[in-house]
Image (cartoon, helix red, strand yellow):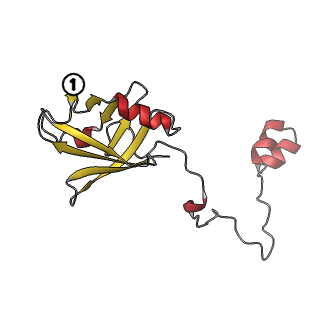
Amino acid sequence: MNRLADAFSGGRSQDIIQDIRVLEKPKEMGEPEAGPVKTTLDLSCFTRFGRKEYRGQKGRWIKVNPKGEIVISNSIGKELPDDADVELFLNKKGTILVMKKCEKGRGLPLGKVRGCRTRRTNCSKLKKVLLDLGLKLPVKFITEWDEELKAWAGKREE
């Protein structure tokens, strides 16, 4: 005699519960099986959130801070000799800055920040011109080496 029959003829009710099986609901005909959704996204249509491309020591940039200090990125600083003097050229709109190495004593001396290759110099006249143009400091110029000028030329970051 099986356990179900024993349960009805005086067996324990727990035996019945153990023998009941839950059957899967049969699938309806023609209904496709659900799977992961596959799409192709064009991320150029999205707004990007994250770090800026030129942040910290990465990238080649020249920045003029509110104190009138010109800060030169690590990438540019390591290519300049320790005792370098530079000249800076700014266009009339304040959108392009050019930094060119010059003879010792004829330009702005570049100092080193302790423990890194970031270089600095001061130029209060450049700060004044940028403020007169209505720009808010700090102003950053993203630069590239210009072989023809033999100088670093940078466009102002908006």
Residue 80, quarter of the rendered image = top left
Residue 62, quarter of the rendered image = top left
Looking at the picture, does residue 35 appear above or below residue 108?
Answer: below
In this rendering, position of residue 7 left or right of residue 115: right
The outermost residue toward the bottom is 30
Instruction: Give the camera-side residue of 156 and 130.
Output: 130
Instruction: Give the camera-side residue of 73 and 120.
Output: 120
Q: Which residue is mark 1?
A: 115
Residue 63, quarter of the rendered image = top left
In this rendering, position of residue 126 left or right of residue 108: right
Question: Residue 25 placed where, x, y %?
Answer: 80, 61
Question: Residue 73 placed where, x, y %?
Answer: 29, 38
In this rendering, position of residue 105 left or right of residue 114: left
Residue at point 38% right, 44% down?
141
Give the secondary structure at mark 1.
Answer: loop
Give the residue type at disc 1: Gly
Instruction: Give the camera-side residue of 92 and 146.
Output: 92
Question: Residue 44 placed where, x, y %?
Answer: 55, 61
Looking at the picture, does residue 43 appear above or below residue 134?
Answer: below
Mark 1 burial class by Cα count in 10 Å: few <14, some 14-19, many 20+ = few
In this rendering, position of residue 101 left or right of residue 158: left
Question: Residue 144 placed where, x, y %?
Answer: 30, 53
Instruction: Give the camera-side residue of 130 and 156.
Output: 130
Residue at point 16% right, 36% down?
106
**Count of labels in the image:** 1
